[in-house]
Amino acid sequence: MTRWMAAVTMMVMLGLTSAAWSADKYRVQEVLPASDASMTPHGLNNNGDAVGGAGLSHGGDIRVFITQRGPAAKELQRATSIDYAEAKSVNQAGQVVGSMNAGTALRGFVCTQSSGLFDIGTLAGDNASGAFSINNSGWIAGSSSGSKGTHAVLWNPQLKATDLGSLAGASDSQAFALNDNNDVVGSSGTGDDVHAVLWSQGAGIRDLGTLAGDRSAQALAINKSGQVVGISNGSNGSRAFIWTEANGMQNIGALSGGAYSEAMGVNDAGEVVGSSSSNLGLRAFIWDASNGLRDLNTLIPSSSNLVLTGAVAINNNGQILAVGSRQHDLANDREANMDNDHHSGATRAYLLTPIT
């Protein structure tokens, strides 16, 4: 799907090293790597707990483990039949959702420290699923797939699945995120194109469209007030957007020299994070209505020797979950961007905390 949802070989709730740097805007903590594991972060809650995936640079055994704001990792489950598991989201209660290899197909899971990974199932007749977001009430947004295509799904806390449907003229849809109001965002086919969509309680599906002139769009995150962010694609490239009820879909833009941008997270204050190309390469950004688009690398100290290439989530305390490389040179920048085989031995995850 997007470059920050590349398949990797482990699921982790990420612990943090004690090493940190001070900066005018953000303090930076490196997420604890497992052995020579490459880190792919995905989700962050308001406690500062982060989740994602970790895979050895050239493969290796699956290790499914969880930590809570510390470097010690507790292995939840080790199953020889599972060679892939990746966490996508974590709520305030520490419930984690993601996808795992169930032997014949990928299946969505929910887990806690006490229960381990639990298969959330599929829609009737399907054989595959994925869980991408969980809210603080335990509702899960994701997708279910089978011979009839892929459908966006909302699971309730008892894991009863509801097909959210698709736009008229299409059969496929996907759900990527939800808020605590159970508003769900994702994408749906239109017959010819793919549009960003919003499902809300009692109102059904709503077409959010694309940026002007584009052919496809995906909504990737939503906050409590209903602000939606994502990516729109067309002949002019891929561009990050923010959608609001008042202004519709607006182009966030790209960093200087860039033709690509993608918005991956938004908090309740309307701060947006993502990734953008630039004249320096791929870089993590933060955007808000007052300051516009800013390269996160300019908001951390140069002495940290980091290149942050993407920011995947921001919580309501302003903490940002980002990915990058500790070595600031061309070779490592390329590794941090990852190749088609997902070989990225230098890639690490970082938690940025505002200095108050």
Image (tube, rainbow, N blue to C red):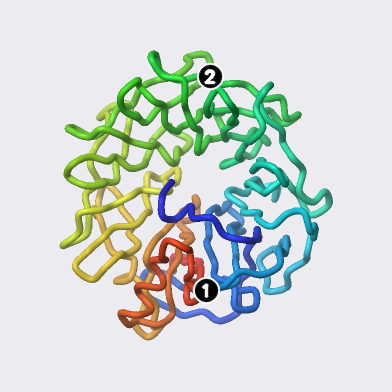
Locate residue 162: give its quadrant: top right
Pick the residue in front: 7 or 283. 7
Q: Is residue 147 visible?
A: yes
Disc 1 crowd rating (10 Å Cα; few below 14, some 14-19, many 20+) is many
Pick the residue in front: 145 or 329. 145
| Disc number for residue 201 | 2
Secondary structure under the numbered disc 2 in the rendered image: loop
Q: Residue 74's spot in the image, x, y percent?
A: 77, 66
Question: Where does the C terminus fall, quadrant-wise?
Answer: bottom left
* Type of the residue with mark 1: Gln
| Residue at horizontal 61 percent and vertical 56 percent from the top | 47
Furthest-right residue in view? Answer: 114
Disc 2 crowd rating (10 Å Cα; few below 14, some 14-19, many 20+) is few
Pick the residue in front: 93 or 64. 64
Residue 110, placed above or below residue 273: above
Residue 130, placed above or below residue 113: above
Q: Which residue is mark 1?
A: 29
Q: CA distance from mark 1 to mark 2?
A: 38 Å
Classify residue 137 as left or right of residue 295.
Answer: right
Number of numbered discs: 2
Locate residue 135: give its quadrant: top right
